[in-house]
Amino acid sequence: MQVIITAVGPDHRGLADPIVHYVATAGANIYEIQMYDHDSERLFAMLVRIEWPADEEPVSVLRERMTEIGRLKGLSVRVWARDEHTRPPRLAICTTYRPEPALAILRDIRDGRLKADPAVMIGNRNACRGVAEQFGVDFQNVGDDRGNPDNRRMAELFDEYDVDYIVLARYMRILPPRICWEFAGGRIINLHHGLLPSFPGFRPYQDAYARHMLTYGATIHFIVPELDAGEQIIHQSTFDVFPGTPLEEITRQGETDHEPRCLSEGLRRVVDREVELHFHRVVRVQR
């Protein structure tokens, strides 16, 4: 069974050794190890992707052992295996203002096109609370009066709701690197409302329009600590406009119709296990 272990905490010596030693001596096949040592933040982060002998030791026991190592070393350790449970994967849908992407996900789940469970919707604004209530999904607001999110509370909610995947459905805040590392390994999926790598950042419609583009699009990609990085693309789709189409019409078409459909398809590819993230690259799953 494939298992991903992440460990994050204050940087000091000997943090990786007990984790690697335990999984290796237990008979795990180590596929991937990534470690980050950020001197400026004095922060250590580590990801280990392994093939775990679950028939010999359940993932729940591995989680207990890793939690104990984390307690001794001052690390926040998470153990995640997509195949640990037979239930559909649980989603945390993160929103800010626009309701259409979240609505597309919930409709596809309702209609059976997306085999997932919407465990919780999290917003830094209340704009999408009504969508959550319409579908009977818990809504949690982690933002203050200005929309500044409580990122630690957000991470706690991911754990409390036992989510498998975090979906940034036009969530217009940057996740801090710590959360990206804590839930690394292809668990965070982002809708970017432009074509990557050509149009990153917060104004892709305006940037493309300024370059007189006639083709616009959206990108669904796995999140890694580098913003809108280049090799994590799950799905892209485009739409064309006629010369002279106003920017307002282009943006309306993209936001209300194109982006939601693109997100649903990208998320379906992940939920249906067509793609995974290995070494910061999207790979096709061989099944």
Image: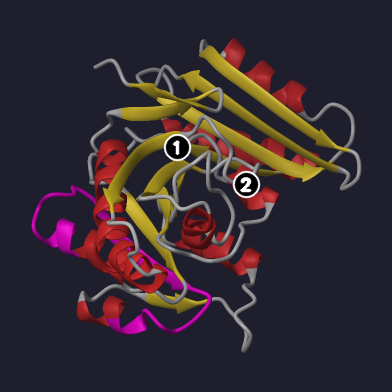
Q: Work out which residue is located at the far front of the displayed protein and give it.
A: 244
Residue located 57% across and 18% down the image: 32
- Inspect the magenta stretch and tell me whether residue 232 lies in it: no
Provide residue 174's location: percent of width, then percent of height. 61, 59
Provide residue 30's location: percent of width, then percent of height. 55, 14
The secondary structure type at the circle numbered 1 is helix
Amino acid type of the residue tagged 2 in the rendering: Leu
| Mark carried by residue 167 | none
In this rendering, would 195 be left or right of 91?
right
Q: Quadrant of the C terminus?
A: top left
* Residue tagged 1: 60
Marks 2 and 1 close (CB-CB < 8 Å): no
Residue 120 sits in which quadrant? bottom left
* Residue tagged 2: 227
Magenta range: 107-130
Residue located 63% across and 20% down the image: 33
Provide residue 250's location: percent of width, then percent of height. 34, 64
Q: Is residue 147 above or below residue 52?
A: below
Residue 25 sits in which quadrant? top right
Residue 72 sits in which quadrant? top right
Report the mark closest to the observer, 2 or 1: 2
Dot 2: few (<14), some (14–19), or many (≥20) neighbours within 10 Å? few
Residue toward you, 247 or 244: 244
Q: Work out which residue is located at the far left of the displayed protein and give it.
A: 111
First along the sequence among labels 2 and 1: 1
- Inspect the magenta stretch and tell me whether residue 121 lies in it: yes
